[in-house]
Image (tube, grey):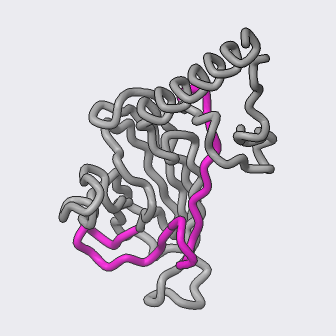
């Protein structure tokens, strides 16, 4: 009888802990170190233009999150102004703002077509599509980094400010196994 009571208390405690962690885990997957690789869109198909970037989460809640962003580009038009724009910086899921592009930083390329920018920003709700645009945020998009199968790539890895959900599916490249009901200990 005593063993059954301990087992039930242990199972209830595990369930309550799991519910608490899931309820308090409001951080998005992009709240980490995000590495961006930009690739040409259709307008520059066959172009050697390319770029890289890092968007690094530095802590804070969704409405007050802090970030550093650095970008470097090559093989662009010389002496041209470009802007780095992210889709959905301020928008909640499903809102019109989640579809809008917002400028992160801008720069003018040098005579060889290279340039880059750095910015410290507050609030970044989404990081799924980042584009390099000519002139302004409303300008033509020429390069893109994304999490989808479209041109470019965005990958994320936890950093010291990330909130890691111990019950999320594991990523073998990170070396952290997922906690599953089978691996959760039962107290006898």
Locate residue 38: give its quadrant: bottom right
Check if residue 147 falls in the magenta segment: yes
Q: Residue at x 51, y 29 (%)?
A: 21
Most foreground residue, 27 or 144: 27
- Which stretch is magenta? 132-161
Say how many tags the image has. Answer: 0
Residue 162 included in the magenta stretch of the image: no
Residue 98 against residue 60 in the figure, above or below = below
**Residue 49 in the image, given as x and y percentages of width and height:** 56, 75
Question: Dividing the picture into quarters, in which one does residue 102 lie?
Answer: bottom left
Q: Quadrant of residue 107?
A: bottom left
Q: Is residue 74 visible?
A: no
Q: Is residue 22 visible?
A: yes
Picture coordinates of residue 174 (x, y %)?
76, 43
Question: Residue visible at 43% across and 65% down?
Answer: 129
In the displayed structure, 157 sits above or below 147; it is: above
**Location of the C terminus (image quadrant):** top right
């Amino acid at each position: 009888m005593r063993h059954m009571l301990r087992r039930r208390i242990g199972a209830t405690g595990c369930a309550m802990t799991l519910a608490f962690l899931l309820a308090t885990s409001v951080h998005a997957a992009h709240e980490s170190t995000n590495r961006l690789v930009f690739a040409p869109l259709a307008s520059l198909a066959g172009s050697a233009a390319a770029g890289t970037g890092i968007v690094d989460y530095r802590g804070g809640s969704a409405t007050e999150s802090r970030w550093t962003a650095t970008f470097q580009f090559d093989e662009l038009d010389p002496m041209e102004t470009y802007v780095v724009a992210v889709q959905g910086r301020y928008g909640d899921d499903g809102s019109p703002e989640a579809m809008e592009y917002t400028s992160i930083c801008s720069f003018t390329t040098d005579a060889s077509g290279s340039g880059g920018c750095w910015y410290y920003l507050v609030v970044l709700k989404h990081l799924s599509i980042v584009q390099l645009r000519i002139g302004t945020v409303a300008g033509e998009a020429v390069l893109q980094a994304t999490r989808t199968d479209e041109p470019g790539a965005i990958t994320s890895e936890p950093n010291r400010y990330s909130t890691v959900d111990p019950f999320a599916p594991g990523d073998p490249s990170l070396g952290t196994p997922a906690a599953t009901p089978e691996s959760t200990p039962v107290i006898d």
